Image: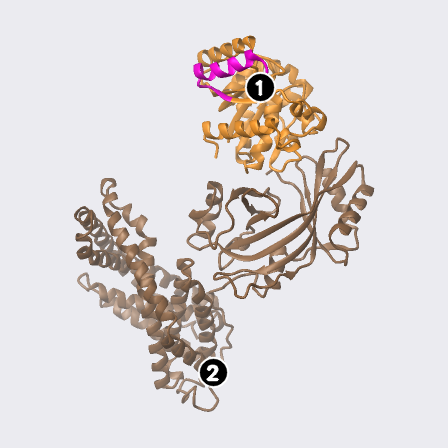
Amino acid sequence: MLAVGNRCYVSVGETGGLARAVELADRVRASGRSSGADIGAPEVVTRTVFDTADRRLRAAGLELAVEVVEAADGPATMVLDGPAGARPLRVPCPRPRRRYLVGDLPDGDLVARLAPIVDVRALLPVVEIRREDIPIAVLDREAKTVVRLRVGDLWAVAKGVPAPLPAPAPVPLLGRVEVTGVLGYRRHYDRVDAALQGDPALSASGVTVVDEAVTAVGGSPGGLSSSVRVDLDREEPTGAAARRVLRRLADVVEANRPGTLEDLDTEFLHDLRVAVRRSRSVLRQTKRAFDPDLRREHADSLRWLQAVTGPTRDLDVQLLEWDGLVARVPDDRRPALEPARGLLVEHRAAALRTMKAALRSAEHRRRWTAWRLFLAADADGPTGVAGVAGVDAGRPIHRVARRRARSLHARIVRDGRALTPDSPAEALHDIRKRGKELRYLLALFGPSLWPAAEVKPLERAMKDLQNVLGHHNDRDVQARRLSALAPELAHRPGGPAALLALGSLIDRLEADQRLARADVAERLAALAQIDLRGIT
Amino acid sequence: MKVLASYNIKGGVGKTAAAVNLGVLAARDGFRTLLWDLDPQGAASFLLRVRPRVKGGGRKLVRGRSDLADLLRGSDVEGLDLLPADFSYRHLDLALDGTKHPTRRLATVLAPLAEHYDLVLVDCQPAISLVSESVFDAADALVVPLIPSTLSLRTFDQLLAYVHDEVERPPEIVAFFSMVDGRKKLHRDVMARLPLDHPEVTPIAIPAASEVELMGTRRRAVVDSAPRSRAAQAYRDLWTELRTRLDLR
């Protein structure tokens, strides 16, 4: 790798700007054999940092930003920094957009590097950092730049989609001194860096500028997390334990709601729905801990939320899987399927409008507020919002969870044994639904309640089973949904050819479904062998 | 990675000025650019303020025994690096002659740099030799500055004939006018006629301007030291033309 040294110091003294630059230039001149330190004209650079909502680039040690140099007439520059020591990738680009999907990026190298990390997630503005930099070029005897310094005063501005209103004021950050080497001049860099390390007004930067900026404007450097890890005590009463898990799941729903409404990428809606689905499952598995009437009321609200978001998600999945599906069809028939894709896009736009209206409705507000109040209520407190505590409310969570895990496992095994080659697709789908319940139980409660060594074999067997059931079910659903397009497609330009190609695709999906069914029996047999005595 | 060689059999025609200015423009456009100063005179290295020295000399370099990462130098322009000249390059023909597949050696030296650079500009010696044959093999294009005079055209025809007849994988040729004095009728006539007869020749003309000559004193590219000058604009036009003709993205 052609690495150059790079280090960032935080300026802890009160001196900033030009005075600091002059001080540093003097220190550098005094430090070694360089012929001089040339202080350049100040530059004001605004840097908008982009990342996925869950900060995947940060986790991968990368930083993507769009830089605009004030007083420059040229385009902005998209810069990809990282991994540490590598030279940044800089690409001219238009002024920063509201969001980028990976296909929108202005350069093939950028796409190639970021696509595996970002996948379908949108790159959104995380924070804007305004820097007033004074560049200092450390020169050798040929008056050549051998080390670059930048003395910077920085401010952070909150960003988001939609943009926050009113426009937020800039928040000052700690001053920075950045030293960057020039390729082939390592000794000069080391000398200057050593001089800076001895400067009492500078200290090594413990956090990155971006993390400091995000924290300063009230954000979380790690971004949005849809993971649910609630540490439970085995003896914790089931009512309280379930509420804690449900509150965390409600947090995930709320965190993903703005991105869903803005349609920033498909994962916001996906994560929102997974959280709703898990919430419904927790309510079902711990139903005897709650007031039955209230439980039914809130189960109905969650079902309503699942239903109003379902059609959009279904169409997202169809469109995300479209290229893979079309690849199954002979080359000469693929162009004929384009009208079908066009129809899906139209349906998706309509479903999105309906979903947005529902999520912004008074009904949704009423239902969700009631749910939140119910979760906030103390299970042992007076009845009212919490209702009458159920028989399991005071029971230790490990007992209720154990009972449910064993019951679900036994039911799946029993239903699996009853399957025949002629069993309808619905029968496999029912097993899959129960399988999801068991997996959610293991994921949400298992880590706190049972040893990993006991849970892992069951989790593995369930994952294997769910994979083939999922494959079977997905093919069934895809085939039926594509068939449902036929009446509308028939009247579209290119419709007859599209129908022919669609028929060919549906045949392949049904053949896949039959292959998947052949694997189900084997996976069910493996699940039946798992010993649950360690789930205590 | 694309390789462009600034080349002419004749010396003093503006090869180095072109290579340095194109290098700066490419880097500013976001191309990770390497300028290889292959001329033992080391003019490009001088202009970029880098000592013309390569550890181990040219012999070790072309025999693949040098660690390239140790030899490269960053210039004052971010995104533009230099593989400096060395006086030992005056014997590069001999060094190549002792190798297997001598006309492929320079391409072999450059190959490991493909992951680090988008563009390599080679500032060539004014000669027709084993080194130039190796450059022709490695290059995607020859960028040929032409003084619009009779003798200059004669050597250009010789170059075209040689490249088309003798080179196994001939690079594209993009020629432009250099050191042009618009007051001279000969220059004006040649510039009007030549592009019509030769599609390799663009009508872009770098003037014989003091800004270009002052590069040696200022040790900066014209596009930086005199960005509004006619010469700077001509180099920018040349860079745009190269990007279009060679599909540089």
The chain coloured orange is: B
How far across and how far down the image is residue A523, in percent? Answer: 31, 60
Q: Chain of mark 1?
A: B
* Label 1 residue SS: strand
In-image side of A146 versus B138 (left or right): right
Location of residue A72 (image quadrant): top right
Residue B217's place in the image compared with A337, above or below, is: above
Q: Is residue A334 visible?
A: no
Q: Is the same chain shared between marks 1 and 2? A: no
Residues tagged 1 and 2 counted as in contact (Cβ below 8 A): no
Determine if the magenta segment contains residue A99: no
How far across and how far down the image is residue A313, in percent? Answer: 34, 62
* Label 2 residue SS: loop
Provide the residue designation for mark 1: B178
Residue B160's place in the image compared with A154, above or below, is: above
Q: Amino acid at mark 2?
A: Pro
* Mark identifier at residue B198: none
| Span highlighted in magenta in the image | B183-203
Q: Nearer the viewer, residue A465 or B100?
A: B100
The nearer-to-camera label among 1 and 2 is 1
Q: Nearer the viewer, residue B99 or A198?
A: A198
In space, the residues marked 1 and 2 are separated at their CA atoms by 87 Å
How far across and how far down the image is residue A320, in percent? Answer: 34, 53
Residue A505's place in the image compared with A212, above or below, is: above
Provide the residue designation for mark 2: A237
Seen as rendered, the residue at the extreme bottom is A382
The chain coloured brown is: A
Q: State the residue at coordinates (51%, 13%).
A: B190
How far across and how far down the image is residue B4, in percent? Answer: 53, 25
